[in-house]
Amino acid sequence: MKKLAVLLAVVAAAIVVWGVLRKSRPPAVGFAHVQRQTLVSTLPTNGKVEPYEWRPVRAETAGLLSSLSVREGELVAEGVALAEISDPTRATDLAAAQARVDEAHAHLSALEQGGRPAELTEIDNNLARARFDLEKERKDHAALQRLLEKQAATAREVEEEADKVRQSQIEIEGLEKRRKALVGTADVDAARARLADAQAALDAVRAHAAASVLRAPLTGQVYGLTLRPGAYLAAGDLLANVGRLDRVRVRVYVDEPLLGRVAPGEPVTITWEALPGRRWSGTVEKMPAAIQPLGSRQVGEVVTAIDNPGRELIPGTNVDAEIRTGVAEGALVIPKESLHHDSAGDWVFRLEGDHVAHCPVKTGNSTVTQVQVTAGLAEGDAVALPTDVPLADGVKVKPGQ
């Protein structure tokens, strides 16, 4: 029994000694060396796609959508008919307006010819008869004068025939005056005004009928089309949009503290989860004019212009964006996870001999995994990587991989 107790005591003492020795051994810490390389600084974020140029197609008149000649995503030319809105009263209104124009035109034509056809015909017939009678009476009067010279007729008979000639002349003069007075200048002007009014009314009805045909306002792609034939549209209702999609705008949401890194003209790369492996390129086109909330973020909307030759990016798509904010040639680079930050600024744990030292640094460009150091470190310096062992200035360590 004594031997067992002695054995247990020896084992316990060995464990205590081993623990003390282990506790006093410096912790193993991983380090990364400062390297010089070209650092491409990027700013990852997200955004939403919209057409580079677009216009809405809205109903200008109310009615039922009687025909639809395009599909969602179809490429159309400017002026092409997209749809038609039916209105049962349109044909009746058009026929009535055309009839009023025809009537006004006929009335004007009659006045320009001297009057209404029936009145002109009556006057012309009376003139023809009166001229015929005048010619006959002149012949009779001449014959009686010859007979009077031969004393075969009396002077009274000659005078009576002369009175008939004068009466026919008076009748002809009266008919000619009546014919001239049948239509005045004011009548013709009034008829022309009535024709112009009727034509304006007809043009208005035609314009209303033309508005029932909805046409593409520009050459582009149809999107946002949700209606089907038979749907009712009020004036101003949206049928669809037509936009240019071979080049799109992406509104990229950049967090307020990072906006200072972005400038117009910087390269932008767009990716979309729906098409993995595809990338679209463009540039920053316009900086934000204001900061606005986006969920829990405060962001500025940076407008980018992106080439979309295959038209795969469609309006409303949520995409990922990466803005290349700078390129640093021969930059001193460390892993981003080795960098610490407090109220005094950025710093790292630098390996000095067998211990680490608190080392303030200044940083420049960065990527998702790396950051440029512009002051505080030299090429080849070793900086501590994250570890489960608490570190402090002057703590001894055992450098690991």
Image: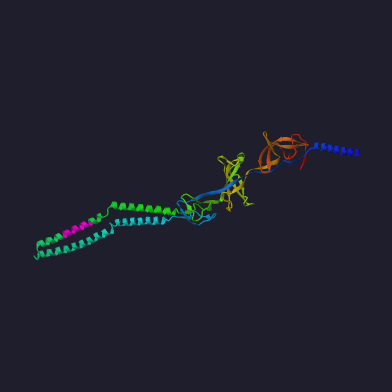
x, y percent for residue 99: 36, 57
Q: Which residue corresponds to the image point at 12% horizontal and 61% vertical from the top-left?
A: 160
Q: Is residue 140 left or right of residue 384?
A: left
Residue 394 location, quadrant: top right
* Residue 169 at least partly seen: yes
Residue 131 location, quadrant: bottom left
Judge whether residue 83 is colored magenta. Answer: no
Q: Which residue corresponds to the image point at 24% horizontal and 60% vertical from the top-left?
A: 122
Which of 94/354 is in front? 94
Which residues make up the magenta segment?
A: 165-176
Which of 277/324 is in front? 277
x, y percent for residue 241: 52, 51
**As drawn, which residue projects farthest toward the front?**
1
Which of 13/304 is in front? 13
**As drawn, which residue projects farthest toward the left?**
151
Residue 335 location, quadrant: top right
Q: Which residue corresponds to the image point at 21% horizontal and 56% vertical from the top-left?
A: 174
In which quadrant of the rendered image does the N terminus lie? top right
Judge whether residue 166 is colored magenta. Answer: yes
* Residue 353 at least partly seen: no
